[in-house]
Amino acid sequence: SQTIHQWPATLVQPVGSPLSLECTVEGTSNPNLYWYRQAAGRGLQLLFYSVGIGQISSEVPQNLSASRPQDRQFILSSKKLLLSDSGFYLCASSRTSGGHTGELFFGEGSRLTVL
Amino acid sequence: AQSVTQLDSHVSVSEGTPVLLRCNYSSSYSPSLFWYVQHPNKGLQLLLKYTSAATLVKGINGFEAEFKKSETSFHLTKPSAHMSDAAEYFCVVSDASGGSYIPTFGRGTSLIVHP
């Protein structure tokens, strides 16, 4: 199975500051990678997904961007954070071979508070 | 296109009584279906999955779900709730539409277990 490492676990940032959340994957090659955001008491919102190095699809217009510099590395960034960027961010991975079905493996999440 | 509807935002049960969390889906292809559990401030953990094999699927912690194509449902059940089952539960559908298995999440059901 896959292991997802995500950091930092907790982050408190002022409005207007930059953001970088990182995610790496072990146990698979060429995975699909995802960034989700979960606002307090709400479901998961898909922000970005990637099917390969340098290939990023954005699901919602926003203040954030994503990059995939290596096969198993996925980075979520912002140049200037907004209050509305606060939330719980989850990185996830899925296989793309060997009978892939869309099953997701999740990291432990990053709690971002923008003040 | 695929979609999933979790029919209850909150379900409240007493410890030792049965659990039923309802999920209906829509898919133009043969879908894969999943249930995930999320405890507070944690990532999501896979409970069980249906991938076109047996329609009654058994998962971890005594949970099971039955895929009913005629009803487009994938309800999650457990015979006897434990206090540790209190968490958020997500139903997810994934199919090959668009050429890639991008999962779609339900809005989640919060399971409350009373002593």
Image (spheres, rainbow, N blue to C red):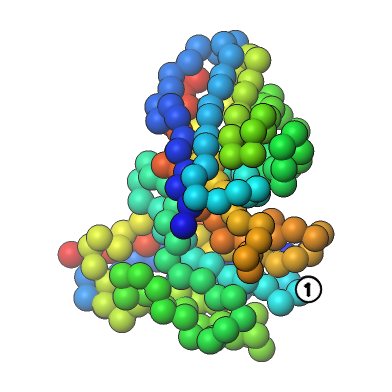
Residue at 79% from the left image edge and 64% from the top image edge:
B97
User: Is residue A36 among what the camera can see?
Assistant: yes
Amino acid residing under circle 1: Ser
User: Is residue B106 among what the camera can see?
Assistant: no
Location of residue A106 in the rendering, given as x and y in whole percent from the top left corner: 48, 48
Q: In this view of the protein, which residue sits in the foreground, B13 or A102?
A: A102
Q: Which image quadrant is residue A36 in?
A: top right
Q: Which residue is mark 1?
A: B28
**The C terminus of chain B lies in which quarter of the figure?**
bottom left
Numbered disc total: 1
Q: In this view of the protein, which residue sits in the foreground, A92 or A15?
A: A92
Residue at 60% from the left image edge and 49% from the top image edge:
A29
Residue at 53% from the left image edge and 27% from the top image edge:
A21
Crowding at mark 1 (Cα within 10 Å: few <14, some 14-19, many 20+): few
Question: Can you say whether B23 is above or below A80 in the image?
Answer: below
Location of residue B113 in the rendering, given as x and y in whole percent from the top left corner: 27, 63
Q: Which image quadrant is residue B61 in?
A: bottom left
Location of residue A27 in the rendering, given as x and y in whole percent from the top left corner: 50, 50
Element class at badge 1: loop
**Residue found at the very far left of the displayed protein:** B115
Image check: A17 left or right of B31? Answer: left
Q: In this view of the protein, which residue sits in the foreground, A14 or A106?
A: A106
Image check: B89 left or right of A67? Answer: left
Question: Can you say whether B84 is above or below B76 in the image?
Answer: above
Chain letter of the residue carrying label 1: B
Q: Which image quadrant is residue A45 in?
A: top right
Image check: B1 left or right of A88? Answer: right
